[in-house]
Amino acid sequence: QVQLIESGGGLVQTGDSLRLSCAASGRTLSTYVMGWFRQAPGKEREFVAAISWSRSSTYYADSVKGRFTISGDNAKNTVYLQMNSLKSEDTAVYYCAARRGSRLNDSWDQYDYWGQGTQVTVSS
């Protein structure tokens, strides 16, 4: 069992940066693929980024590529999402998720554990 707790959301302006954190307990994250998803009001949950420590690889949605960076700290069992050059369309609840195995995946239904989400609001 893995418990995930996100933090770091907030209200920012267009062009600002935020760093989201996802702290895990229960299992070491190095044996999982970790992903970030987001869901805006009235929209479906969408993939943002994923990281596979065992394969040392990352994967990003086209909408955030070049602006967002996913990383992890094994010692702290924490995954981060650094978000730069934020846009109003980035406004959403951001969720951290964990998937058993080592293959990167952008489908939310392939992830086994989820955090409660953290709100990110970007005002223009």
Image: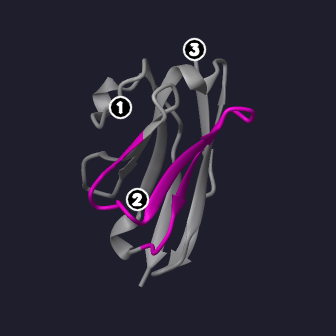
Q: Which mark is residue 92?
A: 2
Q: Residue at x 74, y 36 (%)?
A: 76
Tell me where residue 59 sits by quadrant.
top left
Mark 2 or mark 3: whose residue is earlier in sequence: 3
Residue 88 placement (x, y as % from top left): 37, 75
Measured in 3D between alpha carbons, the distance from the residue under mark 1 to the one under mark 3, in whole angstroms, is 20 Å
Range shown magenta:
58-86
Mark 2 or mark 1: whose residue is earlier in sequence: 2
Residue 9 in view, yes or no? no
The residue lying furthest to the top in this view is: 1
Q: Residue at x 30, y 45 (%)?
A: 45
Indicate whether residue 117 is drawn in magenta.
no
Say which residue label 1 marks. Answer: 104
Say which residue label 3 marks. Answer: 1
Indicate whether residue 83 is drawn in magenta.
yes
Of 108 and 93, nearer the camera is 108
Left or right: residue 58 compared with residue 26: left
Q: Nearer the viewer, mark 1 or mark 3?
A: 1
Is residue 24 shown above or below 61?
Answer: above
Mark 1 or mark 3: whose residue is earlier in sequence: 3
The image quadrant where one finds the N terminus is top right
All told, the count of numbered labels is 3
